[in-house]
Image: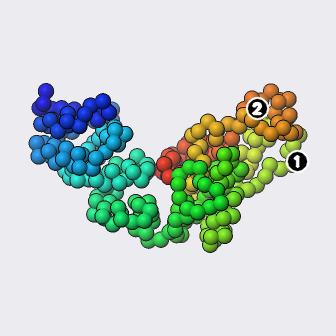
């Protein structure tokens, strides 16, 4: 009605809709399940729309901002200081996790340093490393990183590498990446990667039996140690993709193991990467776009 217009950034709605609204409000759902309306006053509405037009978000960016404004604390911060949308755009472009992108403290920090961040080689993520007093960015390897972009080694923290040892499609695996990081000067003691092979003494067990025992006796303990060391947990392949969650028997190279799978009636086998990812999720971790598993 032009008085209280709910903000909407659907790609089918032109920006002129936004510039014609007198007031903007956002219905937000609170943690207890109740609802509240966050309203922009006349002045903040004008400033907000002016800044939205200035930063020139594309349709995907507008949709994401609309979604983030359902967070009451974030929406109220934008009402108080509409220029924080500049900081939001920087964080969104950097592919940070939802929690970081809507964090008011981080938005204000970016706002204070936004010119430096925009001019910084490597953008927000590289700037953040230096802001945290230490660290190094690695982005040159014999094969590309399939997921998460540059490898960041923070000073004083272990880098725990998770993913496939020998991935398909030409990307680098965990073992090779570890070797190359050591060659670049990262101390071996500050890197972890599971390199323990399946014990040959288990070969008479079923495939599912072997994998279950390997998970319980070796892999799960490795993840527990990773959690305990407090370092960065970095997937170099996306564990959410089906291709990384299951190995299809039909895609395996011909050999004794494939024959064993066929004889046991297996069509696909859960990967250890999926087990690792599911286990970390159960411990309260979430996956960021940069490949890091963090606890919010």
Give the answer, above or below, for where 139 lies relative to 294: below
Query: Quick check: 119 left or right of 175?
Result: left
Out of 259 and 57, give the one closest to the viewer: 57
Q: Is there any visible trace of residue 220 in the rendered image?
A: no
Query: Quick check: 166 left or right of 152?
Result: right
Q: Position of residue 124 (x, y in %)?
A: 40, 60
Give the answer, above or below, for where 212 lies relative to 105: above
Residue located beneath label 1 in the image: 201
- Quadrant in the picture for residue 225: bottom right
Q: Residue at x 76, y 41 (%)?
A: 211
Q: Position of residue 239 (x, y in %)?
A: 59, 43
Q: Which mark is residue 13?
A: none
Q: Residue at x 51, y 47 (%)?
A: 287
Q: Residue at x 60, y 58 (%)?
A: 160
Secondary element type, mark 2? helix
Query: Quick check: 49 left or right of 190?
Result: left
Number of callouts in the render? 2
Residue located beneath label 2 in the image: 250
Image quarter where the N terminus lies is: top left
Q: CA distance from mark 2 to mark 1?
A: 26 Å
- Answer few, some or many: residues within 10 Å of disc 1's Cα (few below 14, many 20 plus, some between 14 and 19): few
Q: Position of residue 221 (x, y in %)?
A: 68, 52
- Quadrant in the picture for residue 215: top right
Marks 2, 1: nearer the viewer:
2
Q: Is there any visible trace of residue 98 in the rendered image?
A: yes
Query: Quick check: 118 left or right of 162?
Result: left
């Amino acid at each position: 009605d032009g008085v209280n217009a709910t903000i909407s950034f659907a790609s089918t709605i032109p920006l002129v809709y936004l510039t014609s609204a007198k007031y903007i409000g956002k219905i937000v759902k609170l943690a207890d399940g109740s609802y509240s309306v966050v309203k922009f006053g006349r002045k903040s509405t004008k400033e907000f729309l002016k800044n939205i037009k200035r930063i020139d978000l594309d349709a995907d960016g507008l949709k994401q901002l609309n979604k983030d404004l359902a967070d009451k604390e974030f929406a109220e911060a934008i009402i108080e200081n509409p220029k924080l949308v500049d900081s939001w755009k920087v964080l969104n472009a950097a592919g940070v996790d939802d929690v970081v992108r809507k964090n008011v403290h981080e938005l204000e920090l970016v706002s204070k340093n936004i010119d430096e961040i925009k001019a910084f080689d490597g953008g927000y993520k590289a700037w953040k490393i230096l802001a945290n007093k230490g660290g190094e960015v690695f982005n040159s390897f014999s094969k590309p990183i399939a997921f998460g972009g540059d490898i960041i080694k923070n000073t004083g923290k272990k880098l725990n590498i998770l993913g496939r040892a020998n991935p398909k499609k030409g990307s680098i695996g965990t073992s090779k990446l570890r070797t190359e990081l050591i060659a670049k000067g990262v101390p071996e003691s500050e890197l972890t990667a599971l390199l323990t092979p399946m014990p040959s003494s288990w070969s008479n067990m079923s495939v599912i039996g072997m994998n279950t025992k390997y998970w319980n006796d070796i892999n799960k303990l490795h993840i527990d140690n990773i959690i305990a060391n407090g370092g960065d947990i970095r997937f170099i392949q996306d564990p959410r993709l089906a291709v990384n969650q299951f190995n299809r028997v039909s895609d395996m190279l011909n050999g004794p193991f494939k024959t064993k799978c066929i004889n046991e009636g297996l069509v696909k086998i859960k990967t250890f990467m999926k087990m690792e990812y599911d286990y970390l999720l159960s411990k309260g971790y979430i996956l960021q776009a940069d490949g890091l598993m963090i606890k919010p």
